[in-house]
Image (tube, rainbow, N blue to C red):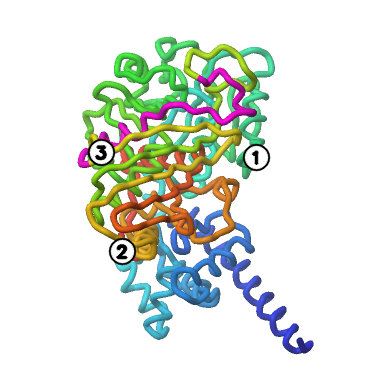
Amino acid sequence: MTDTKLDSYSQDWQERETLAESMIPLIGTLYRKHNVVTSIFGRALVNRSVIRILKDHRFVRQVEGDELDVRDTHLLLETLVSLKPGPAHIDIGKLAAKFRKQGGGDMEAFLKEEVAPIVGQYKEAEKGGEPQDVVLYGFGRIGRLLARILVEKAGGGSLLRVRAVVVRGGKEGDLEKRASLLRRDSVHGPFNGTITVDHDNKALIVNGNYIQFIYANSPEEIDYTEYGINNALIVDNTGVWRDEKGLGQHIACKGASRAILTAPGKGDIKNIVYGINDEAITEDDKIISAASCTTNAIVPVLKAVNDQFGIASGHVETVHAYTNDQNLIDNFHKGDRRGRSAAMNMVLTETGAAKAVAKALPELAGKLTGNAIRVPIPNVSMAILNLTLDKETDAEALNKYLSWSALYSPMQKQIDFVDSAEVVSSDFVGNRHAGIVDGKATIASGKQVVLYVWYDNEFGYSCQVVRILQEISNVKFLYFPADR
């Protein structure tokens, strides 16, 4: 290869890198000043590195056939900022691809037509609105990830405001330990920001968010109004109570309005999978369940398949990361097999996810069975959906449809799609979708199909919980382009 050719590659990379670098403050301005969340074909751009932004541009080859031109997206962002938009979620990748397909031209005129409802709608006085107080009851794996996500979103003017965390204990050094666990995570990496411990007031200041720590052994001990907290959403991530009686303790507290459980609810409690049956939530629902991580992972994919092909019957086998419910080494456990060492064994156990599907998708009631195998990894699980369909299909047609569902359907935040023969579980740590279809593993012959669905059972699920919090807090956005 000639020196001229080598230089051309280097110069092209440096030019694209420079443009991507200059995109970062534009993305930040839209997010923090206008509450506009930007993405490229569903991949969020806020707080991303230059290299990540360029990789997202390259990803578009898998969708459109050609890599997204960073010159187009840079111009689009510059023009968008000048239009003073109001709050929205905008996929600049899809808009840039559409702009290029139309032959380019006047970017300002193009955007004024595409995002017309929000053009010129930025108003400083109305940016924040009335914030919604959120209390995290428990600070384990899900509690800490919820804190990370809520603090991240607060930077863009989200109305959700985490005000307090309720934990047991309160011994000397407890607050420092809590701060350390939030700051460093063996699975999800370091926290993106700063944490200050306020010893005198038993609080953490996290990226400017003042989070009160309340030490209590039960909800009945707490009066949230004493801490200036009112009408709060209580997110119970302990799993101690799962029925209406137990969770009702939360809404009996002064300053609390609703309770959201991060586990399957029992009895008449509505189990909500965001993106599927969240429209079932009413003002009268004071206690809501966000179902399980597995239910959230499989229900969107099952709905997509059922809508297009119909599902006659099926079996769901979950290959699940171990959890704190299991023993590190062999010891007594009230559950069958779960007393054996989680780090040394595959543990066959049960899952209620298959039955729970019917709570979100009544049309699949009685059609699915399920089981689970816990395996020695700390995070990211897989659901294997072995289905008998009403209509015949093949792997190519099924993958094409599921890929479209991940990019353009109303479930695009719940379903992701990957088409690589080299991905493994660790590649999905931090994925914000409820489930990710592995296209290379799809098997289809006539009416018999097998789908493999990855999911980050911690982070992806936590994102679904936050979406429910946004829904019941009326934190809603317009989406552009309007392909939802």
Q: Nearer the viewer, mark 2 or mark 1?
A: 2
> What residue is shown at x 41% (from left), y 41% (from top)?
464
Per the image, label 1 sits on a secondary structure element best described as loop
Q: Earlier in the sequence, mark 3 or mark 1?
A: 1
Residue 159 visible in rendering: no
Q: Nearer the viewer, mark 3 or mark 1?
A: 3
| Residue linked to disc 3 | 367
Q: Nearer the viewer, mark 2 or mark 3?
A: 3
Q: Position of residue 188 (x, y in %)?
A: 61, 41
Residue 194, labelled with which disc? 1
Amino acid type indicated by mark 1: Thr
| Figure quadrant of the C terminus | bottom left
Callout 2–callout 3 Cβ contact below 8 Å:
no
C-alpha gap between disc 2 and disc 3: 34 Å
C-alpha gap between disc 2 and disc 1: 37 Å
> What residue is shown at x 53% (from left), y 60% (from top)?
420
Per the image, label 3 sits on a secondary structure element best described as loop
The mark tally for this picture is 3
| Residue linked to disc 2 | 482
Callout 2–callout 1 Cβ contact below 8 Å:
no
Q: Position of residue 51 (x, y in %)?
A: 64, 63
> What residue is shown at x 33% (from left), y 43% (from top)?
299
Which of the two residues, 334 or 262, is positioned nearer the viewer here? 334
Q: Position of residue 352 (x, y in %)?
A: 36, 29
Q: Which residues are magenta?
A: 337-363
